[in-house]
Image (cartoon, coloured by chain):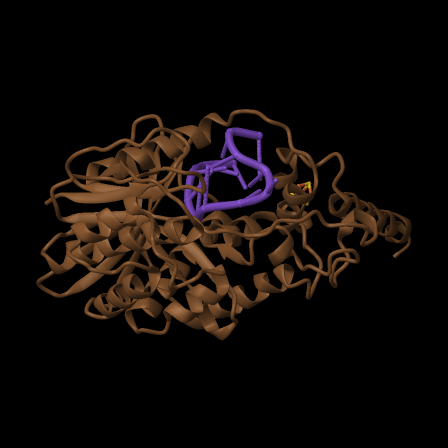
Amino acid sequence: MRALAISAGMAAPTIDNDDLLVSSNITHETNLWGDDDDDLLLFHAVADGVGEEPTGQGECGRFPGKDADTQLVPLEKFRHGYLWVSDFGQQMWCEQKVFYTFTLPTVVEEDVKMMKGTGLHLARELAAHETVPVNITSSEDIWAVKILNLLATIQNFLNGGLLAREIPVFGAPFSEDVFMVGIIDELRFDPESYTIDLSELKTRTTKSNPSKCQQKQHEVQAMLYKKLFDDLVKGVTSKELVARHLKLDLGRPLGESIRQHVDKHGLSAVSLDGLMDHIFGMIQGLTCISQLFVEYVFQDTHETLSHNEIQYCESDLEGQFKHYLQFWRSQRLAEGVEIEEAWKCQKCEFASVCDWRKRKGEEYAMKNMEKNRLGPQF
DNA sequence: ATTGCTGAAGGG
Ligand code: SF4
């Protein structure tokens, strides 16, 4: 079984054989994974957005409410009106840090553990398909790539394929009208039971599972992927919704390079309108995700430390989703870590300027002083 | 900042 994925990037397009996956970037070219011949076509596309600097909203720009100058909330200032699934995980680590990464200059240094993690993910991805570059001429093309890569997965499963990696998903969960985009690490299809399981891969520098709080991050990430995928299967996510949030013109003709791949899938669509009609119809022939797994792999030896099922809890997910959304809508300030998690500040590049950390430290010192002052006498 | 006039994710 061969899969094809497309990617658009700055580099020259490359075409591989075997299973192809495509990823697209904001630039002029994309890569398709896989074989030219057939089967799976996976695209990831990128979205467009709008970014802005937060401005004089008081100390560190942390006050809630719209930005004084631009009247934009973080969702619009820092993202282009839609969020990434991974944004929520970052917020769970430290929301204040998320805020700083968007508003303060950061030090450029290569992160070996992240590069290793990326490498391990890429190796697995390429084991499932190859990428083929495509040319991109518009935002519509970029999203068409994502949709074609999702289509490749769907066609793969409907044709008896068992495994897919790096599957793009998107939607606006929980009727909040906030658009989310993400990429699922891995889906496995069992034709016998007609079930699809999801697996989220995390690599580790130490030979141990992460702390509870990090495990929680990974679980929420996996649950959100399921939610987005299931909404697609259920037909909750419509092309109009996608077009509105991503500011896309459904009728705009797709570029030549994209059209060729559309043709290869046996489709006649010339624009996103027809392409999404097709894919949204087709995905409803699949089934919602059954089991969720998080796999931890040791970076040095590539050995799997654990591969455990996690429980999907929709009400829990919804609660978290709405809480973290408040930050993006300026309905509350960014929250930093509590004193129990001050260890996170140790390696944080913003520690020396972090207002939150300073305040927490002072509060803590104050409490201790109180205790010492009152303590001996009572 | 890798890519940030911003692709998702990459680990802690
Ligand atoms: S110093 Fe601590 S509280 Fe401040 S941004 Fe970093 S991790 Fe968050």
Looking at the rendered image, the quarter that the C terminus of chain A falls into is bottom right
Q: Is residue A308 above or below residue A34?
A: below
Observer able to see residue A72: yes
Q: Is residue A359 above or below residue A71?
A: above
* Lateral position of residue A265 relative to residue A96, left or right: left
Observer able to see residue A311: no
Residue drawn at 73 percent across, 56 percent down: A70
Q: Colour of chain B?
A: purple
Quarter of the render that holds ligand 1: top right
Looking at the rendered image, the quarter that the N terminus of chain A falls into is top left
Q: Quadrant of residue A238?
A: bottom left
Chain letter for the brown part: A
* Lateral position of residue B6 relative to residue A298, left or right: right
The x and y percentages for residue A159 are 10, 57
Q: Quadrant of residue A235?
A: bottom left
Closer-to-camera residue (A55/A94) = A55
The x and y percentages for residue A122 are 31, 35
Residue drawn at 35 percent across, 56 percent down: A253
Closer-to-camera residue (A369/A33) = A33
The x and y percentages for residue A375 are 86, 52
- All told, the count of numbered labels is 0
* Lateral position of residue A77 relative to residue A265, left or right: right
The x and y percentages for residue A219 are 41, 55
Closer-to-camera residue (A261/A347) = A261
Residue drawn at 58 percent across, 65 percent down: A323
Q: Is residue A227 above or below residue A94?
A: below
Closer-to-camera residue (A81/A359) = A81
